[in-house]
Image: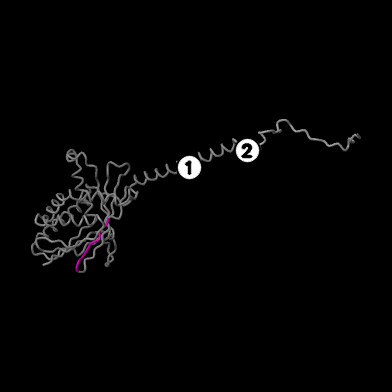
Amino acid sequence: MTPIPAEVQLVVPQLEPHRVATGPQSNLANRSPRPCPSRWRWLLRTWSGGLLLAALAIGLLLAGVVLLAAASPSWYQPLNPAANTVLNDATQAQAALLDLRNQAQNPRWRRLVWRITQDQMNALLAVTYSAADSGAARQHRPGDVLARPFVRIANHRLILAIHDRRLPGAGIISVTITIHTSPDGPAPQAHVRITGLRVGLLPLPPSLLTHRLAAALPRLEPSLYRMLAVYLGRRYARDMAPQMLRRSADFLHGQPFPLELRVHGHGLVLRRLDLRGGHINRRKRWAPAALTVELVRLK
């Protein structure tokens, strides 16, 4: 047999032992590769970073809510009950209320117009709450947590604010009431709604207040009767208190209610319920914010 020349001989490459796969282990090449440790670290950093950002966002949101609730509205400026101007305005408010009672008790009255300014209302509230909040009175009312009420009158809006001692910061609760009347026609009606509720500068749903007031309304009849008896007399209080409670229930449920009341067989129609903010009148003079009420007695 003739030997193969050396230059023609095939050179068979030698495989390294650790790369040889034989028998049942020949499917190692088909196995999925294991994740690299650096990839796990990247995923961990991504998730932890996302959670950290979410926690920071929630913390900032909560801090903003607390700051808004603790702030005080710029228009909330309760009056000093010891100031001379406040005492004078409170005296004028009391005289206006006394004049309203005298006119209402006159059996011959047919038309009654009554007006009170925002300053007079706030002065009367400041003096009244100052006397009720004195040391001797506070001993009998240790659970009283409301103080320094303030009223703001705007066009068709009445904003009531008060300080709640239980709240942190300024602790100011304010309620916005929108009033529209339709006095003309065979069935004059009023549309009164609570359109705003705030703690500080934080807006809240008005339903939080309307539901509680609607549940407490039946318990307010004795207090309403006493208030009407003081300012209008017992004769009107007996007839007006139940009717006003029914009107208040309609108001809290967002329904319009009639402007006519029946007192001793006579009809009383609220022809005017005007809320006007401070403005320049036709005579180019400043007119302060005021509430004007006009009642007409039907035969």
The outermost residue toward the right is: 2
In percent of the image, x 20 and y 66: which residue is there? 187
Q: Is residue 64 depicted above or below 24 in this figure?
A: below
Q: Main secondary structure of the magenta part?
A: strand
Along the line of sight, the residue nearer the viewer: 153 or 257: 257
For residue 40, side relative to residue 7 (left or right): left
Who comes first in sequence, dot 1 or dot 2? 2
Q: Which residues are magenta?
A: 186-193
Q: The residue under label 1 is which amino acid type? A: Leu
Pointer 1 with pointer 2, Cβ within 8 A = no
Q: Which quarter of the figure has residue 298? A: bottom left
Residue 107 lies in quadrant: bottom left
> In the picture, residue 10 is in which quadrant?
top right
Q: Residue furthest left?
A: 107
Amino acid type shown at disc 2: Arg
Q: Position of residue 255 (x, y in %)?
A: 25, 59
Image coords of residue 291 (percent x, y): 22, 59
Q: Can you identify the residue that label 2 sits on? A: 31
**Seen in the image, is 54 located left or right of residue 235?**
right
Mark 2 falls on what kind of element? loop
Q: Which residue is mark 1?
A: 53
Q: Quadrant of the C terminus?
A: bottom left
Image quadrant occupied by the N terminus? top right
| Residue 159 image position (x, y, % from top left) | 27, 54
Name the residue at the front extreme. 1
44 left or right of 240 in image: right
